[in-house]
């Protein structure tokens, strides 16, 4: 029998370190770059105006920065960067960065533009965050962090590195902003972690490896963790996970992570269950994908990466409710024991599915985890996250995620959180008339409905949500970025972690939804 050596990832780059200072950027000793904000002028006397610290820096350096901007035709639009080389001690460069209308989105994108402009630099001091409100301050830090993301497997080391230190300068009350900085770093760190996990090649990232990563993260984040191996899954009837993963040399796993906030009676707090699709590589199985369709399939576990990254950050953002994360992990491979079209599988809890397309495997593993959650965990709210259907990309393009929900209050919260976090999503309809498409002549359901692919996939999953308020985030449209764009870097995006944390950090993220469910229960009685 051939022996396959498991390669080890090389050391990866780290996000920048952030510090806060009341001093203006040019007053920070030893920095290599200054970054100053540029705003569109409020009148027609000039095209742009400079933000705090610019006048003092210009005087200290003997440079007319406004003249530079006028000469280059700068407009102050978001993310526009004008470079001014200087020679002044260790200082080598001044960056004039457009912040547009100074919305949170503008600051997030300005941070990402700055991050790209200071790659391979030792340090940058910037007063951009000094003109930001609370949400803009956070967005600037998150954008700077995520715009710095990189991954490499080069023998000579990474092609470029993030700037090592970012000093948020010119801040009037530095101490008051330190909690906001900590929150921003947790949110940016969740996005970074989700991207990193999704970017790892599948010759390293098999189900056992991903489960081990979850155990490690749980230990670092103070989460309780449980892992089901293939024997446990068989004993307890997780037929979807076993069927999808049975042709792989690395068997499937189910991981459960538990977070509880500090409380005198944590068991009385409402409970959310997050379920993540964790297909570590998707060949399509016997319904094999074309070669070009497999290129990005190392990121078909983005849903599980998002759930894991979100769970790791809940304590840091002060989530006030209990949250359980379930990672349904398998590799959809081709082999002599592969799941076949026409097979019928029995999910956890007993519902059966006829498998008429082995490339519609994500819903099969999610179904097991959702059924387990409803039967064993009694959630108040259930949310699954998955790169599920190519149909979502057809519907929404590549800059907006899609979601479905069976509860209006939950849908409103998901949509609002996406907008605020910079991960916009669009609600899609659960069209009941399409139920006939997922009907099977021999089983409870068919995994290969034709037409309206995103909707029929959601309808398939809805049967496993029971009467629980449920949302399904289909992020296949935004799971991968073809190029660098704002805070998105080329490759897997980790889309969804910021949205979930934006929602779950709120004062009472589940309250309205729980009341809606209670009203439905009363109406049913």
Image: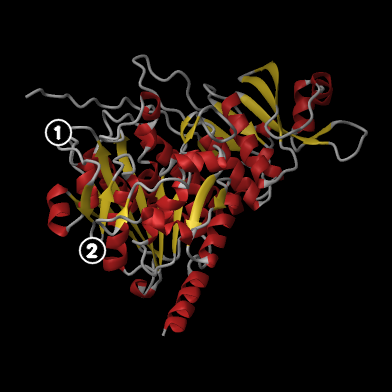
Asked which secondary structure carries label 1, the reply is: loop
Distance in Å between CA atoms under marks 2 and 1: 28 Å
Q: Which residue is farthest right? A: 45
Tell me where residue 64 appears, x and y as whole percent: 82, 22
Q: Is residue 172 left or right of residue 186?
A: right
Q: Nearer the viewer, residue 212 or 144?
A: 212
Q: Is residue 83 left or right of residue 348?
A: right
Mark 1 crowd level (few <14, some 14–19, many ≥20, 10 Å Cα): few
The numbered disc on residue 349 is 2
Seen at 69% across and 36% down, the residue is 24
Residue 333 in view here: yes
The image quadrant where one finds the C terminus is bottom left
**Disc 1: which residue:** 336
Tell me where residue 275 appears, x and y as whole percent: 36, 54
Tell me where residue 483 appears, x and y as whole percent: 53, 27
Q: Is residue 350 above or below residue 456?
A: below
The image quadrant where one finds the N terminus is top left
């Amino acid at each position: 029998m051939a022996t396959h050596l498991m390669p080890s990832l090389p050391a990866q780059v780290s996000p920048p370190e952030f510090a806060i200072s009341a001093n203006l950027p040019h007053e920070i000793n030893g920095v290599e770059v200054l970054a100053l904000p540029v705003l569109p002028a409020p009148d027609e006397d000039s095209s742009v105006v400079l933000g705090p610290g610019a006048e003092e820096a210009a005087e200290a350096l003997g440079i007319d920065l406004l003249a530079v901007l006028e000469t280059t035709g700068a407009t102050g639009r978001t993310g526009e960067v004008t470079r001014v080389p200087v020679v002044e001690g260790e200082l080598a460069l001044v960056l004039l960065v457009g912040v547009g209308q100074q919305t949170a989105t503008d600051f997030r994108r300005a941070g990402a533009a700055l991050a790209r402009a200071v790659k391979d630099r030792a340090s940058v001091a910037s007063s951009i965050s000094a003109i930001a409100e609370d949400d803009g301050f956070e967005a600037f830090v998150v954008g700077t962090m995520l715009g710095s993301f990189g991954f490499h497997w080069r023998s000579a080391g990474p092609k470029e590195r993030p700037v090592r230190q970012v000093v948020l300068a010119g801040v009037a009350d530095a101490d008051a902003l330190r909690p906001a900085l900590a929150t921003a770093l947790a949110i940016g760190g969740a996005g970074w972690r989700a991207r990193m996990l999704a970017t790892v090649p599948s010759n390293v990232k098999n189900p056992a490896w991903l489960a081990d990563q979850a155990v490690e993260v749980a230990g670092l984040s103070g989460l309780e963790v449980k892992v089901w191996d293939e024997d446990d899954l068989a004993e307890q009837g997780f037929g979807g996970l076993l069927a999808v993963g049975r042709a792989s040399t690395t068997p499937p796993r189910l991981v459960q992570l538990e977070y509880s906030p500090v409380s005198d009676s944590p068991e009385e707090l409402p409970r959310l269950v997050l379920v993540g699709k964790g297909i570590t590589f998707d060949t399509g199985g016997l319904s094999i994908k074309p070669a070009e369709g497999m290129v990005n399939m190392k990121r078909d576990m983005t849903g599980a990466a998002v759930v894991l990254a979100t769970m790791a950050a809940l304590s840091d953002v002060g989530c006030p409710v209990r949250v359980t994360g379930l990672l349904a992990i398998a590799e959809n491979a081709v082999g002599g024991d592969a799941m076949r079209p026409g097979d019928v599988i029995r999910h956890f809890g007993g519902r059966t599915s006829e498998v008429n397309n082995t490339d519609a495997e994500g819903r099969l593993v999610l179904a097991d985890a959702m059924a387990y959650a409803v039967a064993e965990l009694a959630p108040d709210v259930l949310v699954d996250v998955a790169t599920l259907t190519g149909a979502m990309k057809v519907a929404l393009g590549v800059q907006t995620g899609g979601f479905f929900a069976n509860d209006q209050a939950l849908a409103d919260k998901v949509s609002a959180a996406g907008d605020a976090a910079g991960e916009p999503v669009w609600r899609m309809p659960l069209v009941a008339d399409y139920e006939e498409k997922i009907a099977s002549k021999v089983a409870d359901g068919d995994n290969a409905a034709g037409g309206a692919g995103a909707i029929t996939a959601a309808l398939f999953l809805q049967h496993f949500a029971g009467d629980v308020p449920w949302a399904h985030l289909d992020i296949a449209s935004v799971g991968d970025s073809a190029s660098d764009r704002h805070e998105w870097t080329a490759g897997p995006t980790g889309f969804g972690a910021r949205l979930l944390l934006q929602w779950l950090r709120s004062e009472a993220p589940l309250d309205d939804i729980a009341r809606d469910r209670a009203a439905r229960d009363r109406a049913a009685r």
